[in-house]
Amino acid sequence: MKIGIYPGSFDPVTYGHLDIIERSSKIVDHLIVGVLINKAKTSLFSMEERVKMIQDLTKDYGNVEVRAFDGLTVNLARECGANVIVRGLRAVTDFEYELQLAQTNKVIAPDIDTIFLTTNLKYSYLSSSMVKEIASYGGDIHSFVPDEVEVKTKQKYKVEHQK
Ligand code: ADP
């Protein structure tokens, strides 16, 4: 059985991430979306909120599970018995970092391979940070994230503005 891990911050999840989830869920038998608890980065959404949003949006897939994790992706992969790490590649700018990460992971966990899915052209420009920046200025983010994510993101900034 092929078990894959798709790790990321997903702060918040975008159509670009959801496209990678949908496509990779057809490649592996079971996909675990790993939501990173990054202590070094302050996130807009809590880990629970990020997990819940992805769970709600992927509930119709029979083989997708969402879990929070901290530490190394390869440790999560080992814990879950996963043999594949899935990453998305948007542009050349992603490539250098992703290659370095994949090669490092291969040294520390030779039994686990990283596979890259190239972005859907429709979403090649899309990132969570851009979504947050636009939302923070009251801009329209409905082309980038599903409705429920849009509502929650807007609420965050409304709350921030009222402070
Ligand atoms: P990280 O903080 O690890 O970069 P992200 O949540 O930003 O986490 O992204 C997780 C993964 O999803 C990464 O492999 C990233 O390249 C990929 N990704 C992000 N946005 C897109 C997109 N628009 N299209 C395809 N892949 C994407």
Image: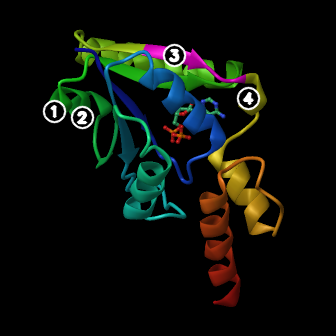
Magenta span includes 118: yes
Q: Amino acid at mark 2?
A: Leu
Q: Amino acid at mark 1?
A: Glu
The first of marks 4 and 2 along the sequence is: 2
The residue where tag 1 is placed is: 79
Identify the image quadrant of residue 109: top left
Up the image or down, 154 lies above or below 50; here it is below
Where disc 3 sits, the SS reads strand
Residue at the location (36% across, 52% down)? 37
Chain part drawn in magenta: 115-120
The residue where tag 4 is placed is: 124
Residue at the location (67% across, 25% down)? 90
Residue at the location (76% across, 23% down)? 121
The residue where tag 2 is placed is: 76
**Label 1 environment density (alpha carbons within 10 Å; few <14, some 14–19, many ≥20):** few
Tell me if the residue at label 2 has its CB under 8 Å from ligand 1. Answer: no
The residue where tag 3 is placed is: 116
The first of marks 2 and 3 along the sequence is: 2
Check residue 147 in the rendering and tell me which mark sits there, or answer none. Answer: none
The first of marks 3 and 4 along the sequence is: 3
**Label 3 environment density (alpha carbons within 10 Å; few <14, some 14–19, many ≥20):** some
Q: Amino acid at mark 4?
A: Ser
Please give left or right for residue 107 compared with residue 60 in the image.
left
Where disc 1 sits, the SS reads helix
Q: Amino acid at mark 3?
A: Phe
